Amino acid sequence: MAELLHDYFTENWRERVLACACGWQGDSRAMAMELHAEVTDYSCPSCGSLVLIVSHPTLEQVQSAAAAGHPEARQQLALLDEARSHLGQSSD
Ligand SMILES: [Zn+2]
């Protein structure tokens, strides 16, 4: 049964060791990653079962995590701001 992570900015989720039904254990970096529009799936490298599903952060989540000093959120926010300025939209 796959675990669903709603908050992308949860601390250390990449290092958390999860167990698969087949007996494999490991963290997200050892799993097979598949990127989708809304989520990223992590599958067991041994049997291919889905182990972890991570929701992509909303802009509001990025902004509040960045405001709280989360380094990755600050990076993402900087990229988003840059993308917006390239589109020529004012960020009021
Ligand atoms: Zn497995």
Image (tube, grey):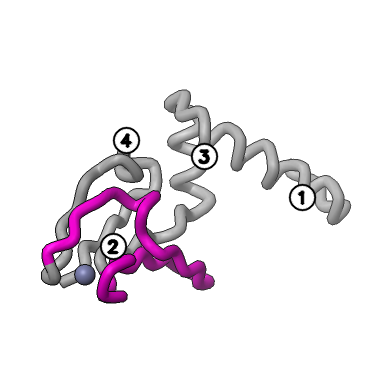
Among numbered discs 4 and 2, the one appearing first in the sequence: 4
Query: Label 1 sits on what residue type?
Result: Arg
Say whether marks 4 and 3 touch (CB < 8 Å): no
Among numbered discs 2 and 1, the one appearing first in the sequence: 2
Say whether marks 2 and 3 touch (CB < 8 Å): no
- Residue depth check, mark 4 versus mark 1: number of the one nearer the observer: 4
| Residue behind mark 1 | 84
Image coords of residue 87 (percent x, y)? 84, 55
Image coords of residue 55 (percent x, y)? 39, 61
* Magenta stretch in the rendered image: 23-50
Query: Label 3 sits on what residue type?
Result: Gln
Does 18 sit above or below residue 74? below
Q: Nearer the viewer, residue 79 or 35?
A: 35
Instruction: Give the position of the C terminus as an image quadrant.
Output: top right
Query: Label 4 sits on what residue type?
Result: Glu
Image coords of residue 19 (percent x, y)? 15, 58
Give me the C-alpha separation between circle 4 and circle 3.
16 Å
Q: Residue at x 26, y 75 (%)?
A: 47
Can you tell which mark lies on residue 52? 2
| Residue behind mark 3 | 63
| Residue behind mark 4 | 11
Dividing the picture into quadrants, the one containing residue 20 is: bottom left
Give me the C-alpha separation between circle 4 and circle 1.
27 Å
Say whether marks 4 and 1 touch (CB < 8 Å): no
Does the numbered disc 4 mark a residue whose Cβ is under 8 Å from ligand 1?
Answer: no
Instruction: Dividing the image into four quarters, tell me where ligand 1 lies.
Output: bottom left
Among numbered discs 4 and 1, the one appearing first in the sequence: 4
Q: Nearer the viewer, residue 86 or 53?
A: 53
Give me the C-alpha separation between circle 2 and circle 3.
24 Å
